[in-house]
Amino acid sequence: TNSDGTLRSLCPGERHLVHWSVANLGTVDETYNVRWYLSPNRRITTGDRVIATNVGAVQNAGHFSTWQRLITIPLTVPPGIYYLGHLVDYDQRIWERRGDNNSTYMASRVRILAADDERCPQ
């Protein structure tokens, strides 16, 4: 859902800008991977539909950063309403005292349209 409460509609093959924030409270720089998912519910897990992966992001020790990138909605996603979210360090490469805080805090609701919907470019 957008900040004004509207449901964002996306077409298969459409590019969508996503953001994520990471804090490294440790004493060494860390390299991590991020994965984006479409889920039927707000709880984003590795069992949800993978739609994009970012490999090799680096977070400096003692810093907080917000990043962004464009992801493409796969052509194979069935039409429907989903929660779009991410997992930081989804592959658990980094040792952490708390790894339960690596998922999207507020997944956004999106409507994936059918590829032949009149609102989608043909």
Image (tube, rainbow, N blue to C red):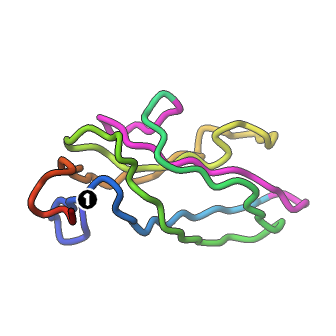
Which residues make up the magenta segment? 26-46
Question: Which one is in front, 27 or 31?
Answer: 31
Say which residue appears at 78% left-offset and 63% top-offset: 58
Q: Position of residue 94 (x, y in %)?
A: 79, 43
Residue tagged 1 = 10
* Amino acid type for the residue under numbered disc 1: Leu
Report which quarter residue 1 is drawn in. bottom left
- In the picture, measured across the screen, residue 116 lies left or right of residue 100, that is left
Q: Residue furthest right?
A: 28
- In the picture, measured across the screen, residue 40 lies left or right of residue 4, that is right
Say which residue appears at 34% left-offset and 62% top-offset: 14
Q: Position of residue 76 (x, y in %)?
A: 35, 40
| Quarter of the image where the C terminus is located | bottom left
Question: Which one is in front, 15 or 88?
Answer: 15
Question: Which one is in front, 43 or 100?
Answer: 43
Q: Position of residue 92 (x, y in %)?
A: 72, 37
Q: What element does badge 1 sit on? A: strand
